[in-house]
Image (cartoon, rainbow, N blue to C red):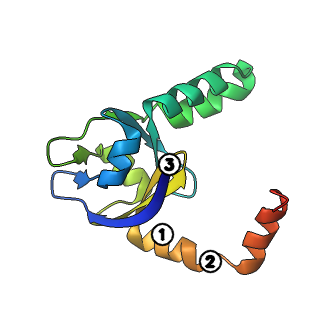
């Protein structure tokens, strides 16, 4: 399970260290793609396959936008011996990743955020918005 929050820096070549606990869960090869709210999604090979299958099951009229969004700019990632991956420039641009990044574990996927964007997003969360979302869980 992907959980936790980790701070890292992107180097001048666009590489970043993936948290060791995430590497264990993601495996030797995983996928980066545009995410929601201005972050990147990081999916294991199984998670990527599930996403592909679910989108492929939709009618083309509904699937095409999702296909373009998730697959067109996606990249396969394989950590090097130091646990670093290269984040392609177009994905760095999409998420506004420059130097300081935050990795989040969200159970079945990880997210990579610009630390500044994450702090702003996190600051905007309220107990009311969380309680409202929890109503969906009947928790």
- Circle 1/circle 3 CB separation < 8 Å: no
Instruction: Give residue 1's mark.
Output: 3
Q: Residue at x 62, y 77 (%)?
A: 124
Compute the Cα span from label 1 to label 2: 10 Å
Looking at the rendering, which quadrant does residue 52 occupy? Answer: top right
Residue 110, relative to residue 70: is it above or below? below
- Circle 1/circle 2 CB separation < 8 Å: no
Mark 1 = which residue?
118
- At mark 3, the secondary structure is loop
Is 37 displayed left or right of 82 in the figure?
A: right
- At mark 2, the secondary structure is loop
Is 100 displayed left or right of 61 in the figure?
A: left
Name the N-terminal-most of marks 1 and 2: 1
Near mark 1 (Cα within 10 A), the count class, few <14, some 14-19 or many ≥20, is some
Measuring from the top left, give residue 75's x and y in whole percent: 36, 34
Question: Which sits in the foreground, 3 or 16?
Answer: 3
- Circle 2/circle 3 CB separation < 8 Å: no
Q: Residue at x 42, y 35 (%)?
A: 74
Measuring from the top left, give residue 7's x and y in whole percent: 33, 68
Question: Which sits in the foreground, 60 or 83?
Answer: 83
Residue 120, relative to residue 6: is it above or below? below
Compute the Cα span from label 2 to label 3: 26 Å
Name the N-terminal-most of marks 2 and 3: 3
Instruction: Give residue 124's mark.
Output: 2
Measuring from the top left, give residue 19's x and y in whole percent: 31, 55
Question: Which sits in the foreground, 97 or 81?
Answer: 81
């Amino acid at each position: 399970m992907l959980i936790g929050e980790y701070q890292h820096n992107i180097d001048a070549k666009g590489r970043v260290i993936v948290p060791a606990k995430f590497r264990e869960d993601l495996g030797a090869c995983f996928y980066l793609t545009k995410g929601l709210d201005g972050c990147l999604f990081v999916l294991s090979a199984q998670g990527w396959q599930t996403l592909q299958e679910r989108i492929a099951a939709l009618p083309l009229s509904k699937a095409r936008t999702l296909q373009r969004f998730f697959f067109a700019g996606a990249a396969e990632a394989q950590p090097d011996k130091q646990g670093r991956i290269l984040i392609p420039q177009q994905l760095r641009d999409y998420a506004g990743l420059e130097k300081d990044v935050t990795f989040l574990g969200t159970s079945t996927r990880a997210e990579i955020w610009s630390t500044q964007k994450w702090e702003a997003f996190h600051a905007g969360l309220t107990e009311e918005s969380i309680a409202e979302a929890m109503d969906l869980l009947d928790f």
